Amino acid sequence: MSKFRTRPRVMAKARPAALPLPIRQDVHAFTKPAVFDEWGRDAAGIRAVATNDNVITMFDVIGEDYWSGGGVTAKRITSQLRAIGDRPVEVQINSPGGDMFEGIAIFNVLREHPQPVTVKVMGMAASAASIIAMAGDHIEIGAASFLMIHNCWVLAVGNRHDMAETAEWLAPFDQAMVDLYAARTGQDAASVAKWMDAETYMSGSQAIERGFADALLPADAMKTDEGAQSNDRQVNELRALELQLVSAGSTRTQARERIKKIKGTPDAALEATPGAGDEWSGLPADLLTFRFS
């Protein structure tokens, strides 16, 4: 048996306190293209071998997704928990992350469930998905799976005063993440902050060693669904290209229209999902675009 089969340290406090959500509900976070690339290369299509009626799957981006017409939302998770009822819950995660604030909302929903919550990381739990994983009373991760944490990543436009205001606005959210990871892992806040600064990917054994997970998930509990893998990778390319165009100065509407013209979008979700937002409407004066990947 691997020396990393179980966590080689005193168990940390499970289910940290609820996280505060920002007053501004019109600000969203988006995953970096590089994280989509990593997920598509190493984690796309990984699914559980077995499932049950008390299992919640998160095999998509966090937050509503324009390109698939899906995404993992707090509303959906709340509905599933209501259907499961007062029973233990298993949450299966393979996600590149997405909207940080939606991830916080999902974390808060899961931590309020009255019965034990077991989280199984299959493939990857990056950024916003890693926040959700911390809601588990018991967290298992595949030996070849990854958990990734880092700071809020922003694209901002403005002068030095705008930049200073942006940094001040962001600081509490990064600190909230530090506090969450430190509470769940038992690690000191300074170490967690350094890992976030470095945009750290942790393998299964590293995640257990550092307290982000409690045990290895058996390899025979996972499989690669070739159909899902192909679809995951195809949609990932669209998501990553959209973000690259936005980084170059396009609005989301302009980026999507350009992509649709190039590929014809026979398989894209052409109608934007509610709340997805086609413009940078309602953002602060410095035109912040939050990205937590």
Image (cartoon, rainbow, N blue to C red):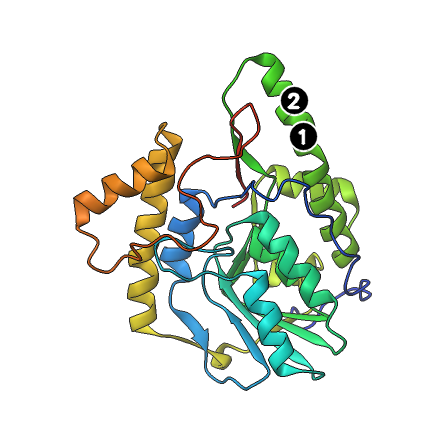
| Residue 159 percent across, percent down from the top left | 55, 13
| 218 vs 204: above or below | below
| Residue 216 percent across, percent down from the top left | 61, 72
Q: Nearer the viewer, residue 44 or 170?
A: 170
Q: Secondary structure at mark 1?
A: helix
In the picture of the structure, the residue carrying the numbered disc 1 is 169
Q: Amino acid at mark 2?
A: Glu
Across the whole image, how many numbered discs are drawn on residues? Answer: 2
From the viewer's perspective, is 30 left or right of 128?
Answer: left
Task: State the image quarter where residue 199 is shown.
Answer: top right
From the viewer's perspective, is 117 left or right of 276?
Answer: right
Residue shown at 56% from the left, 57% from the top: 129
Q: Secondary structure at mark 2?
A: helix
Tag 1: Cα neighbours inside 10 Å, few (<14), some, or many (≥20)? few
Task: State the image quarter where residue 166 is shown.
Answer: top right
Query: Which numbered marker is on residue 131?
Result: none
Is residue 291 something that shows in the picture? yes
In the picture of the structure, the residue carrying the numbered disc 2 is 165
Q: Amino acid at mark 1?
A: Trp
Is residue 1 something that shows in the picture? no
| Residue 113 percent across, percent down from the top left | 73, 72
From the viewer's perspective, is 271 left or right of 217?
Answer: left
Using the numbered discs, state the Cα–Cα distance from disc 2 to disc 1 in whole angstroms: 6 Å
Contact between marks 2 and 1 (CB within 8 A): the answer is yes
Please identify the quadrant where the N terminus is shown. Answer: bottom right
